[in-house]
Amino acid sequence: MTFTAADGFSLPSVAGESVRIADGPALLLFVSEECPTCTLTLRRLAPLVGELTGAGLCVVAVFEDPLEVAARVARRTGFGGVVLSEPAPYEVSGAFSLESLPTAVLVDRGGRETGRVVGWDAAALSSLVSMPVTHEPPLRKPGCAAKNTYDAEALRALDGAGFDELEEMFERGWTDGLPVVPPTTERVRATLGGHDPDELLGEMAPALARVTLERVAACAVLAGCRPEYFPVVVAAVQAVLEPSFNVGGQAVTTQPCGQVVVVNGPVRDAIGLNGSVGALGPGWRANMTIGRALRLVISLTGGGFPGRLDRSTLGNPGKIGLCFAEDEEVSPWEPLHVSRGFPADRSVVTVFGADAPLSISDHRSTGPLALARVLGEAAGATWSPSWWPLGGTSLFAVCPEHARSFAQWGWDKARVRSELFASVRRPASALRWGETTSLVGAADDDQLVGKWSSPEDIVLVVAGGEAGRFSAVFGPCLGMDAIAISKEVPWIT
């Protein structure tokens, strides 16, 4: 077979963007996860990839599997070449007349096939690449049937998918690891509610993919949103698309940061958002699906998918979806959106790039200074216990009992922020261990360093059950110059 710039092929890559193969020299390895011989071949050839690449040969693994499967197998086998994913009906594999996997195809600079090896054959592969391949047993092993040889019914039944549309969503790579609702034309149209599906909201980093209302609606359907949640999802997407939010940086970093969505205003009651008992946990459809919809836009449209462009070491629940309402009726203070300059009667979404929440228990403080110190000292451990000042925003979810105590002691929100900021300080000498900041390194030993650069780095919202003195703090996403963004919910009167 010959493939040229005119008739080469382009397939999705685990590195993010699609890769076009139009010229050689290249070694194409057609493989699949289900085939043990494919795994053996990738593992045995992995040590040669660097040397082959250095010799000018592009080494490409073409998986007849979804991207996340291809990424996982490549990682586990140590394969460091180009990794592509070919979806059904496997036209590229068919064009190469594959019958069995693994198949190694060598093409020259003009794109002409100069040789192939079917199955694992150490001697034949050594000859094909003109380089010794390990002769550790087994030296030869047959493979499995290529998926391009399957009929349509067999493809749908693969891995137990059968005709189950939920399983098909997994096969398509349209999930976050949990089951999703198929985004049928009817469901997406109902979610759009008559709004222009082609309206462009912006480009979602890191893939810089076009984000249209239709794409957002499809992700909202996948997440399980009711149509009436859609305006809140749109506002959240608009927030993360702001350049100063830097969603591209958050989507690819090794940090654990996810996104936290806080909702204020009348829309909370209109759609049943929870800001009371268990506000940060399960049990409320609006909370769970709105946060999830935002994350699906980021991962499926923007390309920030774990194991691909998203390189987060551990991740956190905010990468699945985290949305809650501020309990404005219980709070003794002005709500978050009013603090940020919006009228009280407007519905507003504020999105933070944040770490996982840290629970803070305080059942014994008898004065405001003591309670402020407990909250602040807990936040002192976020990011790193010796990294002071943070240089980013800390979001506190203050439980109603703690907020009520502050109010009874006569402290408004500004006073709480100011005292939190002032109460958490350390001598620079006590912070010179582990990971620390340049400010600490340059300071005199007895210079007091605060956990935050200013009180404005502290954001307070009231949420949670009215019984129980448990608050929480979300650590920041650092090094991104990312700021919290608030957007008014569209189409809400």
Image (spheres, rainbow, N blue to C red):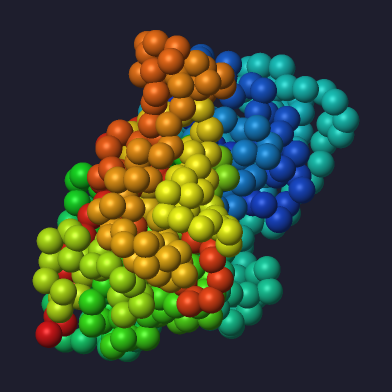
In the rendered structure, the answer to whether residue 75 lies left or right of residue 393 reads right
- Where is 364 relative to 446, above or below? below
Please report the residue visible at 58 percent of the width from the left and 62 percent of the height from the top.
363
- Where is 228 relative to 52, above or below? below
Q: Nearer the viewer, residue 154 or 335?
A: 335
Please report the residue visible at 63 percent of the width from the left and 25 percent of the height from the top.
128
| Quarter of the image that includes the C terminus | bottom left
Please report the residue visible at 42 percent of the width from the left and 66 percent of the height from the top.
405
What percent of the width, then of the height, locates residue 457? Answer: 30, 43
- State whether residue 88 appears in this view: no
The picture quadrant where one finds residue 146 is bottom right
What percent of the width, then of the height, locates residue 139? Answer: 84, 31
- State whether residue 112 appears in this view: yes
Q: Nearer the viewer, residue 128 or 249?
A: 249
What percent of the width, then of the height, locates residue 468? Answer: 56, 71
Please report the residue visible at 12 percent of the width from the left and 61 percent of the height from the top.
341
The picture quadrant where one finds residue 232 is bottom left
What percent of the width, then of the height, locates residue 439? Answer: 36, 18
